Amino acid sequence: MQEPFEPVDVVRIMKEIRESIQKKRERGLYTDEEVESLTALRLRAFAAGAMIDDKLLERLLGPSHDWNIRVDYLIRTTRRGLPARLLLLVKKLVRPVVRLYTDHVLNRQAQLNLYFAHLVHDNIQETARLELETQLLRHRLDKLEKAQGVRGGDEPAR
Amino acid sequence: MKIGIVVQRYGAEVVGGAELHARWIAQRLAHRHQVEVLTTCAVDYLSWENRYDEGPTTVGGIAVRRFKTSRLRTSEGFDQLSSKVHFFEHSDEEERRWIEEHGPVTPGLLKHLKTHQGDYDAFIFFSYRYWTSYHGLQVAPHKSLLVPTAEEDGAVRLRIFKPFFLKPAAYAFNSPEERDLLLRMTGAPDLAGEVVGVGIEDVPAASADEIRQRLDLLGDYIVYVGRIEREKGCSQLFDDFARFVQEQAPHLNLVLVGKSVLSVPVHVNITHLGILSDAEKLSAIGAARLLIHPSPFESLSMALLEAWKMGRPALVNGRCSVLRGQVTRAGGGLYYKGYEEFAETLRWLLDHRQQADAMGRSGRAYFERNYAWDVVMDKYERLLAMVASG
């Protein structure tokens, strides 16, 4: 026998919860979005200091992994005509032999690159979060001290 | 009607949502039809190593015909290629190789389908992404029903699947979101079929007090059910939960039920029970405050249905359109994106006990209306009639 259906308005409850989150943001409580924003700023700032290619940086900060090294490589030449075709053929014949020696090394390096990229990103993100938390706590402490009439080590006002 | 059910693994020892789904459907269809399961000899989906004997057998009263896989899946052959086709520019040939590397490559099964397709009135294929379904369905697509178990991940976007998704005579979708996903992937105005899903087998569940005592579960807990791995959002769950407990709920526990592929952190508030019997699993869910489901990729989620069967609310990953759609339709829980929402929604569910329980009852009513076995099997009968007559 079916139980009577008791509709619960999930959308309304989620709206209330999100409004509650928004109010906390307005009170200065740090948010995940602020942390991500600060992390992105920091990552760009470090990259500017390193003076790396802008296009590579965009790919590095993006969601895909296409910044990473690949074990495969493009077969191409700037030559034209018959010399180009011969050269491409030779390169294609040689490629499997080259890859016998390079695949495992490059694959390992690509994995390490991915790991360190995530490690760096996550560390900067955590640092940003702790910094915002510290700022917030300092802000609250200042407010409390002002409210109690305390000035840096002074006795509370009577 | 003689029905061939093609699934990549089959057996009581096999752990997996799609495989369990196939087994339950096979058992139910066998009440009215002649069912034969066509599957591999593999138990492990990571290697496809042959474990069972090849040939015809019976499992739980169901005729099963097993075929050997012809190659193992290796991380050397698969991981790099998978990364390439998912994240980098790649060729059609590399996508075809991905299907071969992904496996399970089972030439004997394909040969059987080609030779004996006339002996079957209809086929049901489970899980589009496996070699068995990708090649098998193309043998007799005009009498093939596909249960895609598609998720919004990289695999569904591969070019080779676009024409493939137009081949089945009909679909048994797991959710409206899965249907919408395949419509987007194909660009087709419509795909024949219905949203069906699966029921949950009835087993005698123990009372909350009894299961707490038996499994040594103290205090309030939220429960996770399923494979414990990174792809199911478990790493993020551990981080979010540890932070939540530290910040605001030192007495709340997280109980994990399932096989672990990922290391479970050593934490006083996290308990890993491993694999439980169906009865104990349902009982553990029934005694929990709620089911937590952090997975970003699902086509249905049997754990969510289990939670609603037991009248418990769920807190799900809002980035998964299927889970978000299900809890919204059912009124059976809340969803979250990011830690802030995780903390606020979990806090809300813990603080509003009566309303959370009402969500659990709402979920149960939704489950009974849409996933009771008679509802599910009526849909399968309609789809099979459509497919067999085509």
Image (tube, rainbow, N blue to C red):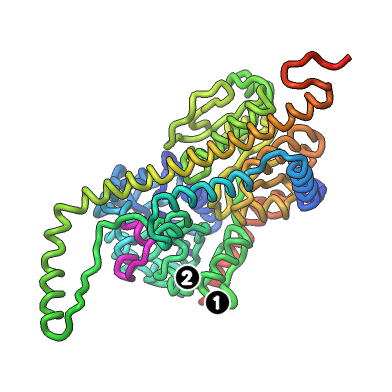
Identity of the residue furthest to the right in this view: A158
Q: Nearer the viewer, residue A54 or A59?
A: A54
The circle on residue B165 is 2
- Residue at point 50%, 66% (across, down): B145
- The image quarter in which residue B137 lies: bottom left
Horizontal and vertical percent position of residue A108: 27, 46
- Residue at point 43%, 57% (across, down): A57
Q: Callout 1, which amino acid?
A: Ala
Characterize the local packing of mark 1: few (<14), some (14-19) or many (20 or more) Cα atoms within 10 angstroms. Answer: few
Element carrying mark 1: loop
Q: Which chain is disc 2 placed on?
A: B
Horizontal and vertical percent position of residue A135: 65, 34
The circle on residue B188 is 1
Q: Which chain is disc 1 placed on?
A: B
Element carrying mark 2: loop
Q: Callout 2, which amino acid?
A: Phe
> What separation in Å lies between label 1 and label 2 (alpha carbons)?
10 Å
As drawn, is A6 to the left or to the right of B309? right
